[in-house]
């Protein structure tokens, strides 16, 4: 839909992602990402934490399966997605609160304080090739055996002692 606001958030996952499915069988993961701003106080020469912002994130289909396999509680992630309208609600104590939600387009671990090892998923029916940056074996072209353009001199239209026209 045009006009949707796309944002990027960096924060930590609050719980292990749990893969679920809709009644029609579409995989999804709901997770919360906590983002706490830090500012440097020049008067005290210390870093101070701001108020933590909790963002609900929804991940769909194959990306949801990858998130469930790859990310765990406490992992620092970078999330990019469409910001949904703010949801206002009353807490158990009667406070009015707002809920931010992102429908995730891309998500991955932040490499600022960690390292990662990537494993490419293969498409169904294709084998992964070790050392291949694309993860799949190149497909050999298939040509008919009697094709005169790819197999000169074997065209059945020529006599056996005739040479190729080239």
Image (cartoon, rainbow, N blue to C red):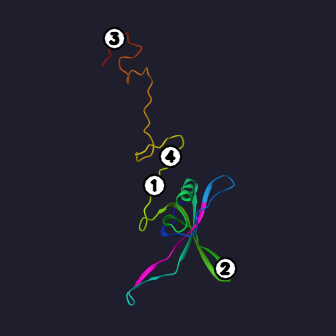
**Secondary structure at numbered mark 3:** loop
Q: Nearer the viewer, residue 98 or 111?
A: 111
For the residues marked 4 and 3, what is the alpha-carbon distance in whole angstroms?
48 Å
| Residue at 47% in and 50% down | 120
Report the disc number at residue 166: none
Residue where numbered disc 1 is placed: 118
Residue 61, how many percent across, how many down? 58, 54
Placement of the N terminus among the 4 image quadrants: bottom right
On screen, residue 97 above or below 107: below
The percent coordinates of residue 45 (x first, y second) are: 38, 87
Q: What element does badge 2 sit on?
A: loop
**Residue at the spot of label 2:** 91
Q: Quadrant of residue 151?
A: top left
The residue at 45%/46% (across/down) is 135
Return the residue at label 3.
Answer: 162
Image check: 79 left or right of 133? right
Residue 86 place in picture, x, y as percent? 59, 73
Q: Secondary structure at mark 1?
A: loop
Label 4 vs 3, first from the N-terminus: 4
Residue 87: x percent and y percent?
Answer: 62, 73
Q: Where does the C terminus fall, quadrant-wise? A: top left
Which one is in front, 61 or 14?
14
Task: Name the residue tied to disc 4.
Answer: 122
- Which residues are the magenta region? 29-41
Report the residue at 42% width, 38% height from top.
Answer: 138
């Amino acid at each position: 839909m045009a006009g949707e606001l796309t944002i990027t958030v960096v924060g930590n996952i609050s719980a292990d992602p749990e893969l679920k499915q809709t009644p029609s069988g579409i995989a999804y993961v709901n997770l919360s990402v906590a983002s706490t701003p830090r500012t440097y106080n020049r008067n005290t020469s210390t870093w101070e934490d701001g108020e933590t912002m909790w963002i609900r994130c929804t991940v769909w289909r194959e990306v949801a399966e990858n998130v469930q396999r790859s990310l765990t509680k406490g992992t620092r992630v970078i999330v990019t997605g469409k910001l949904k309208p703010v949801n206002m609600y009353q807490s158990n104590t009667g406070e009015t609160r707002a809920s931010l939600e992102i429908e995730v387009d891309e998500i991955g671990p932040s490499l600022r304080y960690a390292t990662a090892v990537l494993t490419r998923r293969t498409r169904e029916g294709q084998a992964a090739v070790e050392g291949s940056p694309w993860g799949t074996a190149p497909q050999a072209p298939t040509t008919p055996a009697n094709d005169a353009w790819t197999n000169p001199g074997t065209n059945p239209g020529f006599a056996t002692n005739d040479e190729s026209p080239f």
